[in-house]
Amino acid sequence: MPQPPSPLVDTFGRPLGSLRLSVTDRCNMRCRYCMPEADYVWLPRASILTFEEMARIVGVFTDLGVTKVRLTGGEPLLRHDLPTLVELLAQNRALRDLAMTTNGLLLEREAEALRRAGLQRITVSLDSLRPDRTLAFARTPRHADILRGIAAAQAAGFRPLKLNTVVIRGYNDDEIVALMEFARAEGAELRYIEYMDVGGATGWSAEQVVSQREILARLAEQYGPITPLPAPGPVQAPAERFALPDGTRFGIIASTTQPFCRTCDRSRLTADGTWYLCLYAAEGIDLRDPLRSGASDEELRELIRSTWAQRTDRGAEARLAAPDRGALYQIDSLRADPRREMHTRGG
Ligand code: SAM
């Protein structure tokens, strides 16, 4: 009997499992931890992949074992007609999980169409319950639109909805409990994210990081003992999951103080078709050029296969070991290569 092909793994035995697909580098918010500068260098328009190009590349990735795709950005809903891309991707039978992370500003008008097109899961970023803070910190007066987006996603059947909160000392760390209460009332699962020193976070400092340990301590003070939940499988999700004494589940993404590089199965594709093997990687692999110059699927598979087989990246662990840890990049270096920005390669 023919044996099934052995899964593609990197030098540490990590499979090629999930792909973050950044559909645009544009964003309609200016969060201080991600896009704090006054202006940015954008990817040239002609370099942005069409939906058909994206669906083809995703097909090559799923041939090699990818089963999960998350649409991200920039703000993915700024990409015109996103449900059409979702519809194309949903036809790919090898995809078991098709998800999106959004800031929610445009979600109210898109939630239904995304659901109908075949999107399975949505995560909405919500860092504060206070409109004044959102205005000051993310430079948008439209906090109410985020809440309407959350309601629309629920109504469209995206349940359980996930909420992402980057916790930053001196900004929103006094809302750790309030955000949990909000999520619980919504029936949503909250994931606290440690502030990461990624590209874009030019104002990062260690003092502003609220660690997983501290988040758990604050929650335990309010609610009582917190129970860690077992990981669902051998590949660790970015979030470690926990439960409050009443069973409410939540997650913490502790990439800054407890990196999960050892089990990281994810890679990232920018909107211009540059493939990154790690969120922290300085350089990516150009897939757009071979794609547009007529490479066959087999040639693209071989490029991806041979690159992944040599992968050694453990970016977050390297950052943890770095002495005098500060912002990863200064603004000049980000201007020279905008693909190093978090908003270009996606969170
Ligand atoms: N615009 C969408 C959104 O707001 O969710 C998708 C892109 S955004 C880059 C994806 C995620 O990355 C968001 O949850 C955001 O909070 C997170 N993020 C951005 N910069 C971060 C940083 N410096 N540390 C931790 N998380 C960060």
Image: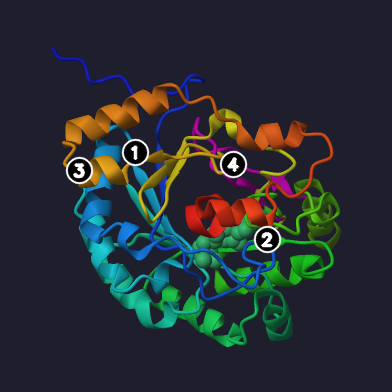
Viewer-nearest of discs 3 and 4: 3
The answer for how far apart the CA atoms under marks 1 and 2 are is 27 Å
Which amino acid, mark 2? Val
- Judged from the image, the secondary structure of the residue bearing numbered disc 1 is loop
Q: Which residue is mark 3?
A: 293
**In this orientation, does residue 162 appear?**
no
**Residue under label 2:** 166
> Which residues are drawn in magenta?
225-244
Disc nearer the start of the sequence (1/2): 1
Q: For disc 2, does the CB lie below 8 Å from ligand 1? A: yes
The x, y position of residue 303, in whole percent, is: 30, 29
Q: CA distance from mark 3 to mark 1?
A: 24 Å
Name the residue at 20% across, 56% down: 52
- Element carrying mark 2: strand
Q: Is residue 307 magenta?
A: no
Please indicate whether residue 238 sits to the left or right of residue 298 in the image: right
Q: Earlier in the sequence, mark 4 or mark 1?
A: 1
Residue 275 picture quarter: top left
Q: Position of residue 81 (x, y in %)?
A: 28, 73
**Against 2, is 170 above or below?**
below
Q: Residues within 10 Å of mark 4 (few under 14, many from 20)?
A: many
Task: Write down the quadrant of residue 99 in the picture.
Answer: bottom left
How packed is label 1: few (under 14 Cα within 10 Å), some, or many (20 or more)? many
Which circle marks residue 280 in the picture? Answer: 4
Indicate whether 192 appears above or below 29. above
Figure check: 73 above or below 316: below
- Residue pushed farthest left? 1
Instruction: Mark 3 vs mark 1: give the one in front.
Output: 3
Amino acid type, callout 3? Ser
- In primary-sequence order, the first of circles 2 and 3 is 2
